[in-house]
Amino acid sequence: MIAYPLGRRARRRSDPADGEGLVSQADLRRPGVRWGLGTAHTILLAGLVIIGVGPILWLAKSAITPTQDTITHPMSLFPHGAAWSNLTQAWTNVDVGRYFWNTIVIAIGSWLCQIVVATTAGFALSVLRPRYAKLITGLLLTTLFVPAIVLLVPLYVEIVHPPLVHHSFIDSYWAIWLPAGASAFNVVLMTRFFDNLPREIFEAARIDGCGPFRLFTSIVLPMSRPILGVVSVFALLASWKDFLWPLLVLTDPNKQPLSVRLPTIQAQTELGVFLAAMFISCLVPIVGFLIFQRSFLRGPGLSGAIKG
Amino acid sequence: MATIEPVASAVEKTQDARMRQPAAESSRPRARRRPSWPPGDALSTLAFLLPMLAIFGAFSWYPIVRTVIMSLQHTNLVQPATWVGFANFSTVIHDPLFPIAVKNTAEFALLALVFGYPIPLIAAVVMSSVRRRGIYSALAFLPVVIPPVVAVLLWKTFYDASSTGVFNTVLGWIGLGPYPWLQSQQTALPSLVLESTWANAGATVIIYLAALTAVSNELYEAASVDGAGLWKKVWHVTLPQLRGVLLVTMILQIIGTAQVFLEPYLFTSGGPANATLTVLLLIYNYAFGNSLGGDYGAATALSLMLAGFLAVFSLVYLRATRSWSSA
């Protein structure tokens, strides 16, 4: 009910079919505009393919090209045939398979922790609304203004010498999973989404005798699938991309994720195998992106946040 | 030119008023209707807040406080910490590497603005005139999902300074180069910025695209009725409508690039001759670069100085652009 006017407006504004948009029919009737636009679109598409995707295509090509060919003729296409062995060598000899698995374990744990923290906190702050909700929201928002670098050293010291528990968490995946949950942005996103859910449904559920836990699992969570998708996609991607923190807290090579191992692999193996390892490590994000494009492309618009 | 603006802003105002009305109507009773759920069940509320309080307490609020304490202490994790006042801060300021790092970081941020700020905007405006832009936005966003380590190491291969390096080969086709890229003090930093722009521009494009679809069609129609061509519409409708987003992306980009770490760390380790030593790399070197034990005091002091600078910078920036962003 409440979300309706907003939804209708958004649809009308973004639907190119019923409005004119920047380029009107009258503009299109002018040949100069049509040609100019056509040229601009072609140039943009060519630029996106060559500059945006070109490096990735080159990586795909070189992952299955013999090292010598890549070194001497980097831009020619298979002058002496393909070398599929690069991929198998990377997977087995360089242990990419193991690091790949580590990356997945780290990503899933971080994702789970973020989802649990964000949904429960968002539910409490938006639906249950205790009197101190404002104070907690304020404390959450202040963490958004603290750059991550400020936390790096104290967090590291905390992991090495944790207070209360006298046991170092170095080389434990908990050292990555748990701090990943402390994302104020996720909580804010969830709270805002829950704020827009129709209260009438909650009231109806309460009249039917639904307690807060039932309300959370049977009503609020199923209604939040879109936002859960966005948060999940970005949690998994961020974990897959992370480098510095796992580098610091995982010193055992057998536990490190791919991103941490790649610089070492580069120093120890021939170029072809190394490029194959790199290709394998960006395969999952690329395939995930192609499948869940919608959630990916909705995220930055929601967040307005960019990393330099 | 002058005739378009009053009409456009009048349309904007009436439209704004129309939009605000239902929102204001619906939000007021909603706020009043909000009881705690169910009234008085404080314990289950606390149970829902517990994961967040525990995680944020341990990994966000406590470390923030700890940073301030550590910056005033001398710690090596073995002996008990001693209070040293502002000695860590003066150590950092008197470090000969400090001005170099600040200069390089500022240069990186500035170059990133020059390379990376106009391109996503132009790309997004052109893209917004495409009817089926799905493929465009997907292509633009693809580099963003590549793990940064892969992006950096891949570009490191491209930047091979020999004449058979990838970039040198391509530039050789049109008779340029070979260039030293990462190996020269002059070209190392711009090379880093180039890769960083490639890796991050796609996210900005998507933000602009979202903002562009929110520009109301009525403004464009009004401008068309007033006889504005395509350029005038871009200049007098699109860009003014985007200025709020443009200002935000600029400050966010500056905050982001001021904290650049991965590129200098993996590309050059700060070399050649400290030409790519950034503030974050210096913090890392203080804390983790020395195998004999880190200087955590200096590292936290420098990170607090950076955070303080960014906070002051953002405040001044928002104050200075306030009248411009919301007129």
Image: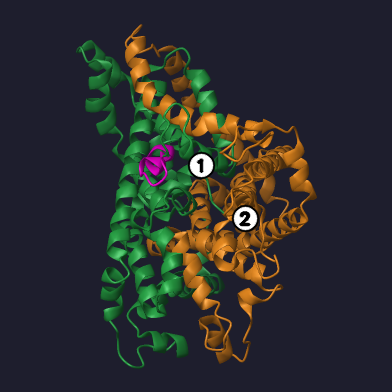
Look at the picture and state if B118 lies above or below B13: below
Residue in view at x 62 percent, y 61 percent: B118
Quadrant occupied by the C terminus of chain B: top right
Q: Is residue A31 magenta?
A: no
Mark 2 or 1, which is nearer the eye? 1
Q: Which mark is residue B281?
A: 2
CA–CA distance in space, label 2 to label 1: 16 Å
Image location of residue A303, percent across then percent down: 48, 43
Look at the picture and state if A133 lies above or below B99: above
Amino acid at pointer 1:
Tyr
Image location of residue B262, percent across then percent down: 54, 58
Q: Nearer the viewer, residue A269 or A307?
A: A269
Estimate how packed mark 2 is, as few (under 14), some (14 to 19) or many (20 or more) residues with alpha carbons within 10 Å: many
At mark 2, the secondary structure is: helix
Q: Does residue A280 appear left or right of residue B30 in this picture?
A: left
Image location of residue B30, percent across then percent down: 42, 17
Farthest residue toward the front?
B79
Residue in view at x 70 percent, y 69 percent: B273
Specify the colour of chain B.
Answer: orange
Chain letter of the residue carrying label 2: B
Instruction: Report whether residue B320 is seen.
Output: no
Q: Does residue B240 appear left or right of residue B154 in this picture?
A: right
Residue in view at x 41 percent, y 69 percent: A265
Question: Which residue lies under the disc numbered 1?
Answer: A156
Look at the picture and state if B264 lies above or below B210: below
> Looking at the image, what colour scheme do you see?
by chain
Instruction: Report whether residue B292 is seen.
Output: yes
At mark 1, the secondary structure is: helix
Estimate how packed mark 1 is, as few (under 14), some (14 to 19) or many (20 or more) residues with alpha carbons within 10 Å: some
Specify the colour of chain A.
Answer: green
Q: Magenta segment, which residues? A: A169-180
Amino acid at pointer 2:
Leu
